[in-house]
Image (cartoon, rainbow, N blue to C red):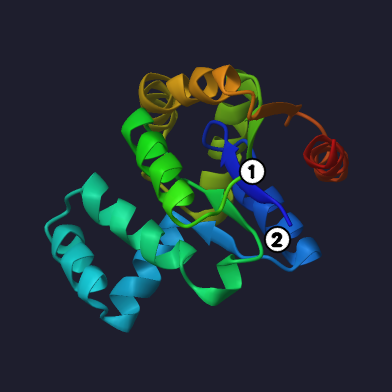
Amino acid sequence: MPRLIFLGPPGAGKGTQAKHLANSWQIPHISTGDILRQAMRDRTPLGIQAQGYADRGELVPDQLVNDLVAERLQQSDAQVGWILDGFPRKLSQAVFLDELLQKLHQGSTRVVNLEVPEAIVVDRLLKRAEKEGRADDTEEVIRRRLEVYHQETSPLIDFYRDRQQLVSVDGNQSMEQVTAHLQTAVNS
């Protein structure tokens, strides 16, 4: 079963595709945002720590996110395969994940990069913000998120490409076409 990491800018369709493929393959879709929210709801020791940062309006530190991901990947349902969405976001997290997977004997990870032109991403995110009533998702905020993505997450593309783990898929197609290309790319 596949162990996949989804990369791509905000609005590329990572979450949508990850959920769809995870359901199809009956493996967990592991989103760091979902892990954090669940840990806080369950009041786990890591969740309590994360809640403190959230209550202060601060970002959860990398080490805490790393610990949450490590805990999640050791759960029984993740032994057969998984799709990671939203992690790693930066090079230090990719190095941590690589070491963790070696320790857990979970190898053969494929990394899928959903490529979508920036203008399309901005348009998608503005439409999503309007549809979901996210008044704070202005074009300026969206462009800042993309800038952060390019600074922190884009280097992961080269990191995984150099290791021959990267597969790029054109995310600027219909959902069905992207899904078909993902399935072909992962199975090749």
Task: Tell me which amino acid carries mark 2.
Answer: Ala
Q: Earlier in the sequence, mark 1 or mark 2?
A: 2
Residue 168 image point, x, y percent: 70, 26
Q: Residues within 10 Å of mark 2 (few under 14, many from 20)?
A: some
x and y percentages locating residue 36 in the rendered image = 35, 64
Residue 55 visible? The answer is yes
The image quadrant that residue 39 belongs to is: bottom left
Q: How much space separates mark 1 and mark 2, taking CA atoms?
A: 17 Å
Comparing 100 with 132, the one in front is 100
Q: Nearer the viewer, residue 169 or 76?
A: 76
Residue lying at the far bottom of the rendered structure:
42
Q: Residue at x 26, y 81 (%)?
A: 43
In the image, which is nearer the foreground, mark 1 or mark 2? 1
Q: Which residue is mark 1?
A: 108
Residue 60 seen by the camera: no
Mark 2 — residue? 22
Whether residue 37 is situated above or below residue 111 in the rendered picture: below
